[in-house]
Image: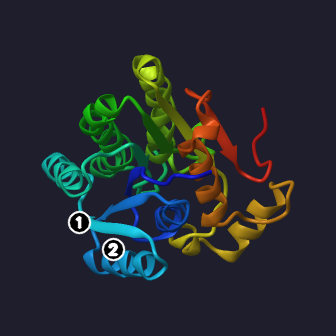
């Protein structure tokens, strides 16, 4: 899966899945633009990639702010000359039972997890059209497929990403641009680290492979969908969940 010469933009890259994706795509030869709110963590990631012989640059961005998205993407193109791979990974949770969920928490999750993906795609597509080559990869969730109590906002945003993925796939396929989603299951990240040990143990019981996933498991899938080997795959949701949901 050689990505030499390709330019990738990854949102939510300061930690977890986005961090692992940045390191992995850089190892495959891609120049990586890493975006997130935390400048210090982005700088540390860029330094780590460069130390390993890769190419990377940091672009601080809050995906909940449309103008920051537009400005950052312009800066990435000015720096690298193009964007050919977009990984929409940024996401948050604001968990609560729906009867108690505040509208502000609904809006925050939908804006960060779903609207930001639409805005990033909209602003990146012109560069992909110019290159006549592109890979759009949206990180959704198993809970966007099966739901989860206390996560109506999160599940709705991730289900929306799946629909967005398929709609975009139909719009841009004729231009040699693919649009796919990856649906992680239970992955060991800072987002899941705050969950109780009892919850984690119960979750593992629902996973046929008998373990939680790692950010690297997702990064491997992202690298595949970004490669030429996946050129005939579009509008697809790739489940990376240890068998937690099948079919």
Report the front residue among 105 and 87.
87
Above or below: residue 168 compared with residue 82: above
Can residue 91 be seen by looking at this rendering?
yes
User: Residue 60 has which mark?
Assistant: 1
Q: Report the side of 42 relative to 198 (left or right).
A: left
Whichever of callouts 2 and 1 sits on the residue coming sooner in the sequence is 2
Above or below: residue 99 compared with residue 15: above
Q: Position of residue 17 (x, y in %)?
A: 52, 63
User: Residue 42 has which mark?
Assistant: 2
Report the front residue among 62 and 74.
74
Q: Secondary structure at mark 1?
A: strand
**Residue at coordinates 46% horizontally, 17% vertically from top-left?**
170
**Residue at coordinates 69% horizontally, 67% vertically from top-left?**
199
Report the front residue among 129 and 140.
129
Mark 2 in CB contact with mark 1 (< 8 angstroms): yes
Q: Report the side of 187 relative to 172 (left or right).
A: right
Callout 1: 10 Å neighbours few (<14), some, many (20+)? Answer: many
Per the model, the C-alpha gap separating discs 2 and 1 is: 8 Å
Report the front residue among 150 and 37.
37
Q: Position of residue 68 (x, y in %)?
A: 16, 53
Q: Tell me where residue 157 sits by quadrant.
A: top left
Q: Secondary structure at mark 2?
A: helix
Above or below: residue 167 compared with residue 227: above
Q: Position of residue 200 (x, y in %)?
A: 71, 68
Q: Position of residue 193 (x, y in %)?
A: 57, 74
Callout 2: 10 Å neighbours few (<14), some, many (20+)? Answer: many
**Residue at coordinates 35% horizontally, 78% vertically from top-left?**
41
Q: Residue furthest front?
A: 5
């Amino acid at each position: 899966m050689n990505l030499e010469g390709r330019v990738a933009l990854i949102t939510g890259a300061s930690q977890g899945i986005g961090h692992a994706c940045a390191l992995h795509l850089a190892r495959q030869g891609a120049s990586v633009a890493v975006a997130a709110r935390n400048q210090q963590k982005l700088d540390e990631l860029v330094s780590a990639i460069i130390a390993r012989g890769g190419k990377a640059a940091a672009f601080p961005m809050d995906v909940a702010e449309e103008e920051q998205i537009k400005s950052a993407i312009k800066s990435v193109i000015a720096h690298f000359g193009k964007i050919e791979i977009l990984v929409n990974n940024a996401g948050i949770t604001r968990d609560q039972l729906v009867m108690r969920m505040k509208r502000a928490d609904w809006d925050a999750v939908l804006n960060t997890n779903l609207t930001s993906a639409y805005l990033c795609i909209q602003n990146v597509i012109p560069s992909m059209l110019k290159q006549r080559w592109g890979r759009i990869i949206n990180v959704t969730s198993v809970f966007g497929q099966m739901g989860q109590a206390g996560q109506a906002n999160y599940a709705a945003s991730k289900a929306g990403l799946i629909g967005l993925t398929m709609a975009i796939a139909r719009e841009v396929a004729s231009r040699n641009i693919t649009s796919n989603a990856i649906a992680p299951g239970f992955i060991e990240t800072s987002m899941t680290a705050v969950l109780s040990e009892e919850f984690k143990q119960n979750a593992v019981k629902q996973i046929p492979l008998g373990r939680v996933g790692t950010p690297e498991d997702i990064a491997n899938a992202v690298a595949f969908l970004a490669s030429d080997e996946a050129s005939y795959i579009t509008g697809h949701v790739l489940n990376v969940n240890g068998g937690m949901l099948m079919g």
